[in-house]
Amino acid sequence: MPPEDGRERYRATIMGHPNKGSGARGKADWDRTRIQVNGHLTLTGVPERASEWILGPRPALELFLQRMRPSVDKKSGIRNDPNEFSDDPKYVVELTKRVIRVCVETLELVSILPQYRNWSS
């Protein structure tokens, strides 16, 4: 049952794709159409294409989700909690939706770039 308190209901703790089960060779098989925010809130309907935009070695969406997980630096003890970045309890959830949209729209723009390659000639 989700908490009554809005801040706790939308509090990001997990921020990752749930596992569909074991894939080939025991590797995790992530459900890229869902993002688990916490134990009782999961975003559904995420376009799988959102994970195709690669920045460096990993998908941009994965890098974002990793940064949105609350953490504590082992060495300094400094706590990083994205839930505290705003007074809006839905801040992390709404930001996640925007990042998903940016990923998909960026891929759409990149896909049409080749037709404009020689536009100045």
Image (tube, grey):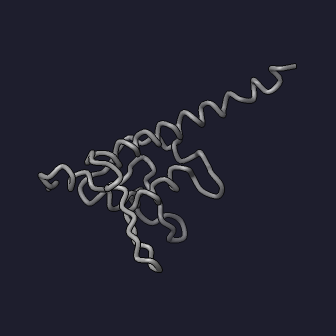
Where residue 8 sits in the image (x, y, percent)? 21, 56
Figure quadrant of the C terminus: top right
- Furthest-left residue in view? 4
Where residue 11 sits in the image (x, y, percent)? 27, 55
Where residue 115 sits in the image (x, y, percent)? 75, 24
Nearest to the observer: residue 52 or residue 102:
102
Nearest to the observer: residue 16 or residue 28:
16
Figure quadrant of the N terminus: bottom left
Nearest to the observer: residue 4 or residue 24:
4
Nearest to the observer: residue 16 or residue 30:
16
Q: Does 104 appear above or below 118?
A: below
User: Which residue is rendered at x = 38% and y = 57% of the image?
Assistant: 15
Give left or right: position of 91 versus 59: left
Give left or right: position of 109 versus 1: right
Is residue 78 in view? yes
User: Which residue is rendered at x = 71% and y = 29% of the image?
Assistant: 113
Classify residue 116 by image quadrant. Answer: top right
- Furthest-bottom residue in view? 75
Give left or right: position of 78 versus 114: left
Where residue 6 sits in the image (x, y, percent)? 18, 49
Give left or right: position of 91 versus 17: left
- Count of numbered tags: 0
Q: Does 43 appear above or below 109?
A: below
User: Which residue is rendered at x = 50% and y = 55% of the image?
Assistant: 62
Q: Does 46 appear above or below 56?
A: above
User: Which residue is rendered at x = 31% and y = 50% of the image?
Assistant: 42
Is residue 20 in view? no
Q: Does 78 appear above or below 47?
A: below
